[in-house]
Amino acid sequence: MIVQAAFNLAALQLRILGAMILRETRATFGSSQIGYLWAIITPAASVAVLVTIFSLIGRQPPFGSSLALFFATGILTLEFYVKLSATLMNSFDANRALLTYPLIRETDALFARLVLISFTYLLIMLIFFSALIALGLAGVPHRPEIVLQAFIATAALGFGLGTINAVILSFWEAWHHVDKVINRPLLFISGVFYVPSLLPPEAVAVLEWNPILHLVEWFRVGYYPNYHSPILQADYPAALALVTCTIGLGAERLFRKQRASR
Amino acid sequence: MIELREVSKSYTLKGVTKTIFDGFSYRFPRDRNVAIVGPNGMGKSTLMRLIAGSEMPDAGQIIRSGRTSWPLGFAGGFNGSMTGLENIRFVSRVYGQDTETIIDYVQAFSELGKSLDLPIRTYSNGMKARLAFGLSMAIDFDCYLIDEITAVGDEAFRRKSQAVFEDKLGHSQIIMISHSGATLKSYCDCGLLLAPDGVFFFDDVEDMLRDYHQRFGSNDKA
Amino acid sequence: MKLGDLSADGIETVEGGPGSMSMARLARLSADARADTLRFATLEVGRAEDWLRAALEDVRIFREREQSLDPSASAAVQIELLAELERELLAIRSRMAAFGDRINADTPAMVSLRRQAETLEIQIAEKLATVSASQNRTGAPGALSEQLAAFEALEIEKSFAQQAYASALSSLEQARADADRQQRYLAVYTHPAVPHDAAYPRRILNAFLIAGAALCFWVISVLIVYAVQDHIA
């Protein structure tokens, strides 16, 4: 009896999640048919621009022989995090209308966005790295399981911080701007253009507090066969992800009532 | 069957706490259509949302058996940038219905035609109401929660709605908020009056409307 | 190699355990290497010994067969005798020459002298025949020159064998000396520091961390289950 109820509940949850994901796909990637395609093209374009600039000024790849691969490992991880946290942050506002349907809860929107963005970036990475491999610009990932771990950690951290941001935003609308200010320098302090371990110790001492940097390094350690990263401490972003997820989900539930009355 | 047990609900807005319900218990009569009236701000819509489950009570319990509709209002619940069809698909997926059946029904009922392929934000209030009404009628609920909706549309649409309602009434229950006494009288057979000094149940809609007018003056036609 | 111990007073364990274990392993390796080198040297000595013994045996057999202790010595004796005879012959001939003009050849003194000279010449010829092999091949005991040649070959063989034996013995000695000098050994590079308090294991910290992580997982799970249950609340 209880098993049956749990089963029904799970089926209901999956049904709602599925419907929400389809709806979010439209909401997040626009109404045009190629909206989803744009999501794939955008990061590819930013990598291409970087590669072009660096090639023009005659810079060697900071590591390995392929500029494209080096930048892709950094940019895709960073963009995944930024996109996920930003999408989750706006989740409550964007889905206010949905609360009319009693079956749908605010957490459903969070979970749907998490699944959608993660799946999208998984797809982007698959396409992008396959293309690089096909063009001879990259090798196959050395240890795919580590790459996957880095990906999951990125998703968890993005979910945790995104949820916390969403809760803060629902009480303080200026948080939008604060978050923008915080996120802006991420591109430069996350090791996208350089090998962080080769920086002077003073810089490392500051930069190693940036969890995104660790995620980028984690990804590279899994992808490159010989990428040694003394700076990488995988437990740091993992622990942070765990804590932020707990705080985020807890805060969402704790402040649900106050949020609803606004 | 819907039952509220010791339900409390309050809102805090700009530091001011307004209590709507405090330990309110009520069991809705089974198989009777209930009209809810009361002056603005007494919590009619809140009660509706609580019954639907779109809102959680601060304390207490709400017990429902059977499928309860979402509170059927004017615009709520549609995503403006999505087309009418997409919104229909979404709702039917959430409620686990067959998408195509629902679309066929809503198309036939709402008479929106090609407008269904346009984003909701291009719809007039009347079109939205037709869509919402058609959509909720397409799904078989055991209890329909209607918040000021039937007064939309032209005469033909109203007759059509009436016909569908009559049909549904055989096996479904209606809980309705309206300022129109005529509407209430034609659909409901008992009533709930939310007043500052308490909640009163009337076995007859006429009695309730009379009491309502005595208390709050006559700004509605009885 | 980096070693640590989980308690502050575990220094002996660190230094004694893995340290002495490594030492023992190295000692075994050294012993093996030592036995290896010694085995080769000993084998070499044995081989030289056999060779020398065979050479000495050959000399002994030769002596028995030729019944001569030292053919070179007996050759010297023969040569001495020959020289003696020739000297005598020379003296007789000079006397004969001195008498030649004054005394008739038929005088008894002259005849006796001539006879003596002839006897000496025959004796010299005989002696020469025994010394030189080319003129006489009467067999064993063979001609002295042949004997000498064979003997000298044996002597050379013997001296080679002796030298080989000596060098084998000395290299065995060398090998033993090398092996006795221990070649590989383990030295403690840095002695373990003795801490006041053990930094590891961070039992309390780890317990907290694990409890915290478990708590987070639990809270997340519960919140997700609640989020799912909300749908039928």
Image (cartoon, grey):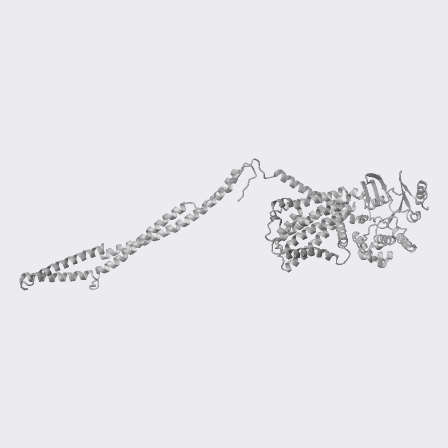
C155 left or right, relative to C174: left
Question: Which residue reaches farthest front?
Answer: A57
For the point 79% across and 52% down, which residue is it?
B94
- Does residue B23 appear in this view? no
Which percent across, then down, holds residue B191?
Answer: 90, 44
Which percent across, then down, holds residue A92?
Answer: 77, 47
Which percent across, then down, holds residue C28?
Answer: 45, 46
C207 left or right, relative to C99: right
Which percent across, then down, holds residue C12?
Answer: 51, 38
* Number of numbered discs overlaid on the protein picture: 0
Instruction: Report the front residue among A233 and A9.
Output: A233
- Does residue C159 appear in this view? yes
Question: Which residue reaches farthest top?
Answer: C196
Instruction: Report the front residue among A173 and A89.
Output: A173
The quadrant of the picture occupied by the C terminus of chain A is top right
B113 left or right, relative to A241: right
